């Protein structure tokens, strides 16, 4: 079993719903996209290694779950201000999304 956290610790995560507004390959990288994600009135730049699983067209407009209160990280010369959530097993990957429409910025609890 993995490390156990308390509900108080989990609530420290600011996980929100956002829509991918823009997608572009990170210059010089074979694996990275730079996303602009609309999280409800704010665009948040996120750098992610999804090139092997999704085309830019597949990602554009996709509703995703994003952790907003991550420490910013410089990846391949680009700043990333969050982390999208995905599930991966045996070389397969799926982005976490919603089962029906909900506004950007909605908090995951």
Image (cartoon, rainbow, N blue to C red):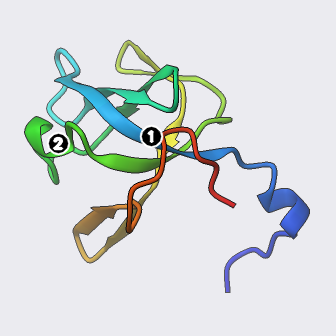
Q: Secondary structure at mark 1?
A: strand
Image vertical order of residue 57 relative to residue 12, above or below: above
Quadrant housing the C terminus: bottom right
Quadrant of image for the N terminus: bottom right
Q: Quadrant of residue 48?
A: top left
Instruction: Tell me residue 92's x, y (percent).
Output: 22, 70
Q: Position of residue 54 (x, y in %)?
A: 15, 49
Identify which residue, 17 or 83, lies in the foreground: 17
Residue placed at 20% from the left, 42% from the top?
59
- Among numbered discs 2 and 1, the one appearing first in the sequence: 1
Please identify the quarter of the rendering in which residue 76 is found.
Answer: top left
Q: Which mark is residue 18?
A: 1
Q: Secondary structure at mark 2?
A: loop
Q: Nearer the viewer, mark 2 or mark 1?
A: 1
Badge 1: how crowded within 10 Å, few (<14), some, or many (20+)? many
Q: Which residue is mark 2?
A: 51
Q: In the displayed structure, does residue 94 sit left or right of residue 104?
A: left
Q: In the image shown, does 62 or 28 lie closer to the viewer?
A: 62
Residue 21, located in which quarter of the rendered image?
A: top left
| Total numbered labels placed on residues in the image | 2
Q: Residue at x 32, y 28 (%)?
A: 35
Residue 36 vertical placement versus 88 (above, below): above
For the residues bearing labels 2 and 1, Cβ distance under 8 angstroms = no
Residue closer to the observer: 22 or 92: 22
Kindly identify which numbered label has been placed on residue 65.
none
The residues bearing labels 2 and 1 have C-alpha atoms spaced at a distance of 19 Å
């Amino acid at each position: 079993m993995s490390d156990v956290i308390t509900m108080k610790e989990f609530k420290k995560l600011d996980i929100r719903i956002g829509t991918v507004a823009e997608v572009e390959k990170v210059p010089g990288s074979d694996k990275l996209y730079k996303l602009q994600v609309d999280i409800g009135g704010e665009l948040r730049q996120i750098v992610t290694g999804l090139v092997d699983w999704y085309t830019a067209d597949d990602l554009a407009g996709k509703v995703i779950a994003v952790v907003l209160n991550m420490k910013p990280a410089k990846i391949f010369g680009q700043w990333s201000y969050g982390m999208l959530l995905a599930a991966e097993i045996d070389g397969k990957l799926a982005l976490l999304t919603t089962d029906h429409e909900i506004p950007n910025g909605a908090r995951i609890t």
